[in-house]
Amino acid sequence: DTMPAAAAGDAMPAAPADAGGAEGDDEEPLCRFCFDGTDAGELISPCRCAGGQKYVHLSCLRWWQRTVLISQPIHPELFDTDTRPRICNVCKSEFTTPPPTRQELLSTFTGPELAALIDEGCIIGSARDFSQELEQLLATIPQVLRDDVVCRHWVQGVFLIMKVKEAGEDGVEIYLRLTDAEEVERFIEQLETDAQTFNLRGRRFRLQPHGPLSGLQEGASPEDRRTALRAVELPANLAFRPEEAED
């Protein structure tokens, strides 16, 4: 089946303005996503929206939720609190049909048996049929947005597993690679005033004084940190650790 062209970064599609009025007795309910009726599949009312916004095909909603999830980072420490798969962007109520969990989502890609095969030194490759499925999915997303879709790396991809860590394991670090002076300056501009804390997708990360910054003293001033960053030999991988989320 061909699904409508909706970018992973978009909000849940809304019906056209002329479809937003009260439902007439003779009006056939239409999906707010693809604008087809019941002949194209089961229609549900997953939120508090009314009128032309009320109905959506279960398959359309599921496809859109899945598209949003696969556009997000895959590293456990970069999971954010994106509410789009759970909350209607029009009426702000929670969908009665929850999105798939990450485990369920990955199982649709890999099968549940893959987790037992993951170990350091293993190689994972994308099957031809799987690559073709992802290419079809990417074709529905505007070209300018495709670089932000994480799953594009799996199209005809082959990966060597260098290290395996459990999600939430203590000591997990995130690395940012800087390749030239312009990237360093852009990065410095994005740091907080302490020149040590970095915000990414709603999470806060703290720059670690080791690796290329091993000469940086604990308690260094913000200006000293900026000077050390500008003096780093490039390319360089900077280490960060996520800060504990406040209750």
Image (cartoon, helix red, strand yellow):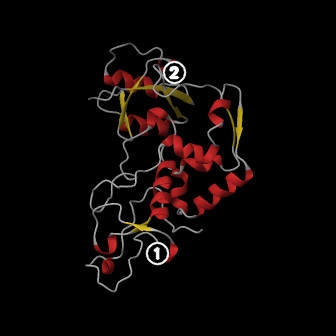
Q: Quadrant of the N terminus?
A: bottom right
Mark closer to the chain start, 1 or 2 = 1
- Mark 1 and mark 2 in contact? Answer it, CB < 8 Å: no
**Three-letter amino acid code of the residue under disc 1:** Thr
Residue in the image at 60% along x and 50% along y: 152
Question: Within 10 Å of the Cα at label 1, are there few (<14), some (14-19), or many (20+) other Cα atoms?
Answer: some
Mark seen at residue 212: 2
Residue in the image at 64% along x and 43% along y: 110
Q: Position of residue 127 (x, y in %)?
A: 72, 48
User: Quick check: 68 above or below 164?
Assistant: below
Q: Is residue 226 left or right of residue 59?
A: left
Which residue bears the numbered disc 1? Answer: 38
Which one is in front, 98 or 139?
98
Marks 1 and 2 sit apart, C-alpha to C-alpha, by 60 Å
Q: Secondary structure at mark 2?
A: helix
Q: Quadrant of the C terminus?
A: top left
Q: Secondary structure at mark 1?
A: helix
User: Quick check: 170 above or below 26?
Assistant: above
Question: Of discs 1 and 2, which sits in the foreground?
Answer: 1
Which one is in front, 41 or 224?
41
Which picture quadrant has residue 17?
bottom left
Q: Is residue 49 left or right of residue 150?
A: left
Q: Position of residue 72 (x, y in %)?
A: 48, 46
Which one is in front, 93 or 17?
93
Q: Position of residue 37 (x, y in %)?
A: 45, 77
Taking the view exactly as shown, the residue that stands out farthest to the right is: 128
**Three-letter amino acid code of the residue under disc 2:** Pro
Residue in the image at 26% along x and 78% along y: 21
